[in-house]
Image (cartoon, helix red, strand yellow):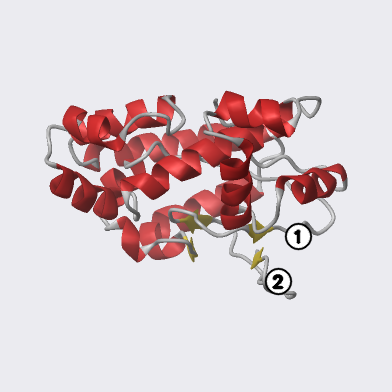
Amino acid sequence: MGRIEKEDYDRQPLTVLIGPQFSRVNIKVHRQLSAIRVDFLPGGMYRMLGIPMHELFDDGFDALDFFGTNMRRINEQLQHKSSLEEGKNIVEKFLLNQVTGLKEILPFDSALRMLLNNNGNMPIEKTAQFSCLSMKQFERKCKERLGMNPKMYARILKFSKAYRLHEACPQLSWTEIAYEAGYYDQMHMIKDFKVFAGVSPSVIEKQLLSTPLRMQKDLRY
């Protein structure tokens, strides 16, 4: 894993726990990639770990540091499985065993789910109202459970939809994608691409033509 401004790559552990991601990360695959990915709903990682997300913001960590011998055992089991389906079952069983320790779900979590389902296209003030918190309380809770302020999270959601739309429907023009993703105009979308992807949409388009990986294709719209 290496950020876009680096030319070298860091070798990653067998199981990586990635905190709330802001910066672009380039992945270099050696020979063949066989991996199982788990995506958390907003606030889900905090509910499982109980760690303020700003402490994990924009970085990756060895999952052994969080789950200890249990994760070591999972890694060993996965090394001896011949199919991803078997590996998926092992990971699901492990995560279900963690459910008993989850922090309780709050109106805040339901409000974030609504923001996610709307791809960031919901007024932050309205989201805060659904969370039954004042605006200041809502912003503090976002820092704790998301690692960032709510406006930045909403921008990432909107950018993510635009990116995934291009991956799934490359025949769409960038003007059409900006509209479908809920941007005010194409220039606002271009600005977010430069912030979160480090390059303009036209450069992303060329880069995707040269890579077989589609890291966001399985995420829901």
Asked if disc 2 and disc 1 are in contact, CB closer than 8 Å, the reply is yes
Q: Between residues 216 and 85, which one lies in front from this camera angle?
A: 216
Q: Residue at x 70, y 71 (%)?
A: 9
Residue 8, label in figure: none
Q: Amino acid at mark 2?
A: Tyr
Q: Is residue 41 left or right of residue 175?
A: left
Q: Position of residue 137 (x, y in %)?
A: 14, 47
Identified at 32% across, 42% down, the residue is 43
Q: Where on the picture, by quarter, is residue 131?
A: top left
Residue found at x 21% / y 35%: 128
| Residue picked out by circle 2 | 9
Badge count: 2
Residue found 66% across the figure and 72% down from its top: 10
Residue 100 position within the rendered picture, expressed as x and y whole percent measured from the top left? 24, 37
Q: Relative to 70, is 121 above or below?
A: above
Mark 1 burial class by Cα count in 10 Å: few <14, some 14-19, many 20+: few
Q: Is residue 217 visible?
A: no
Q: Could you say where residue 197 lies in the image, as x and y percent from the top left?
A: 64, 53
User: Which residue is nearer to you in this view: 68 or 13?
Assistant: 13
Decide if residue 58 is on the left or right side of residue 82: left
Q: What separation in Å lies between label 2 and label 1 (alpha carbons)?
A: 8 Å
Q: Which mark is residue 28?
A: 1
> Sequence-wise, which precedes: disc 2 or disc 1?
2
What's the residue type where badge 1 is placed?
Lys
Mark 2 residue element: loop
Q: Is residue 18 above or below residue 212?
A: below
